[in-house]
Image (tube, helix red, strand yellow):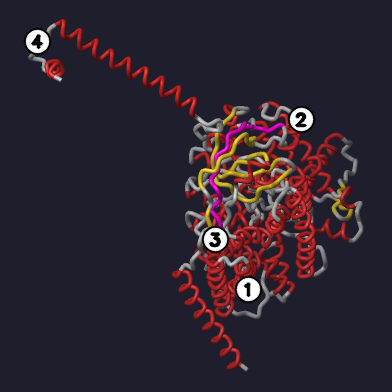
Amino acid sequence: MILRPKIEDVKAIGYYLGKVAIGLGLCMSIPIIIGLAFREINPTLDFLIGAEITLIFGIALTKLCHTEKDLSWMQGMIVVSLSWLVATVLGAIPLYLSGHWNSFLDACFDAMSGFATTGLTLVQNLDHMSYAHNLWRHLIMFIGGQGIVIVALSFFVKGASGAFKMYVGEARDEKILPNVIDTSRFIWIVSIVYLILGTLALAITGMLSGMQPGNAFFHGACVFMAAFDTGGFAPQSQNILYYHSFVYETVTIIIMILGALNFKLHYHLWMGNRKEIIKNIETKTLFITVMITFFITAMGLAQSGIYPRAILLFRKGFYQLISGHTGTGFQTIYANQFNNEWSHLALVGVICAMALGGAVCSTTGAIKMLRIGIIFKALLEDIKKIILPERAVIAQKFHHIKDMFLEDKQARSALLITLAYLVLYGLGAIVGMHYGYPFLNSLFESTSAAANVGLSCGVTSINMPSALKVTYILQMWAGRLEFMSIFTLIGFLVAAVRGK
Amino acid sequence: MDNNVKYQNPNVKINPKSQYQIIKHWFCHLRFVICAYFVICALTFVIQPSNSFAQSISSTELINNAKLYDGKIIAYEGEVIGDIMKRGQFAWINLNDGKNAIGIWVNKDLTREILLSGSYRYRGDWIEVTGVFHRACLEHGGDLDIHAQALRKINNGRLIVERANLEKRNFFLILSGVLCLILILTQLKRKSKK
């Protein structure tokens, strides 16, 4: 028998959702300050309106649904899944008001793409965008990369138990420190330290590349946020191609890789445990999968013959590949070049890289390295069971911060999530093909959306059907939250309708 | 004139001799037109300045048919956007034709003509360049770019004057009122509870 949710459930969800909305509204003060500093009148008004609507919504919810109770698992999961939708709609308001998006749906597409750190975009005339709006596009990646709910956790949520449920709901099942609020604060500290260092590195590189100092710093901050949070937006329409600089590309590669590593690994590196990076199953798997997928991509590029020298092939091929593998989506080629110039084999290499993703408890999407590593270990174990005598006791070990024995439960969980991702990639590809796009292009774009990457082969454009835009929004949402909280929300809605 | 009238009227019989004269007359005209055409063409070629530009090709055409234009001298025009990034004797500029922006590798001296580049505040100078198009430039790490040989300013950029949108301002004031009301009510409720 399905039980209909109680009014207490709705109140608890509404209360915490309100807290998240208030947090988002306060975040809009940053572009307001930037707008005032650069004397951008209308952009400042856009953000004042957006912040007011968000705060009114948040305060009204917290007052109407006020509760002292802590969250249950179900409520925590639903708060997370709804938070991302609410943040998308509210975060899209200032974007839409700017006039750079053709419709509110397009603005929502970019807001979800930003929060989910995807990087697919439907923006128009980006090269004439205000500083305030451009900063907001990148800031939502920074907020989304850390986790929207972590913003609220760090500043507004007192109860650690409820906080942990929301933390898990946001696809982070690993606590770095014993307390989840301390964990989210540590994630913020790491991100802000890297933000300062990364912005400086990119700004200096930009200035040495001939950019004006002010612009170099602004671009440095924006590109850092997009790279570290594996987002993929950039302040100019040409993305990273705008800079025409090998050094700039190299710095972004380093930041992208840092963003794709587990925050727990960052913690251990900060604590002086440098050997962890060599021993960890995730970094080992990442290294191997990068090598394999780059080999496939390089073969494809050699086949197409577009890059006559190996160094050009490496620079272009490796950049798009590492950008796809880390889930960032920075491009140094035009979207249509994927279509017209790259061979199918090269595209397959990039699709595989995008589908695999980075580390768990990082800002990347997709299947992730720990799961790939576990599945590989489980496969090895099964092969050993067949080959070795029946009496032999076989135990697979792997190192992830500490040495662990592989359990069936872990392998099952990894396989289930992997299967869910593969289904999600496939469904998006089917919708793309339904609207007349070729198979490989549909699969490329669908994988890019669902794995929160942001590389585009030209399918994502303002002219694509609205249903496909909605499909990609849902894929970005499901891919970022890793399904569980969304399944819980669906279950909650079914119970609300059919429950007794 | 009379001959023409007779020629156009089907009911009138035409003398074969006069018909020959008409054809001869028209042939003389045609010869004159052909000669004039060649003279004009020749003059155009002579008068034409050395830095003249061919018909510009759009960014979409260049990106979609990069193989076709690879290594060829083409003309491309667009608005200068973002920074002019000086690198030694050369500089990178990015020209956006409204669809895409393409990087132009240009001699630093040629960029002196550029006064404004596009941003939120400015509409950048509209520039036309002729140069060698590269699908995957060997010199610049495989970038799709144009190595400019000549540059010409077509239109000057301008400052974009920004005026406050009154609808947005009024909406902001209404929302401010609502937000203040909610905050006051919240404070009153809190005090009454105490």
Query: Foreground mark, 1 or 3?
Result: 3
What secondary structure is found at the residue carrying circle 4?
Answer: loop
Q: Are marks 3 and 2 in contact (CB under 8 Å)?
A: no
Is B64 left or right of A148, judged from the image as shown?
left
| Residue sitting nearer the eye, A152 or A210 | A210
Q: Are marks 1 and 3 in contact (CB under 8 Å)?
A: no
Which residue is disc 4 drawn over?
B13
Q: Amino acid at mark 3?
A: Leu
**Gap in angstroms between the C-alphas marked 4 and 2:** 81 Å
**Gap in angstroms between the C-alphas marked 1 and 3:** 22 Å
Which residue is at a point 59% across and 77% down the rendered structure image? A62
Which residue is at a point 60% across and 80% down the rendered structure image? A66
Q: Amino acid at mark 1?
A: Lys
Q: Is residue A267 above or below residue A153?
A: above
Any magenta on residue A287?
Answer: no
Query: Foreground mark, 2 or 1?
Result: 2
Residue A480, label in figure: none
What secondary structure is found at the residue carrying circle 3?
Answer: helix
Which residue is disc 3 drawn over?
A95
Magenta stretch in the rendered image: B122-138
**Gap in angstroms between the C-alphas marked 3 and 2:** 42 Å
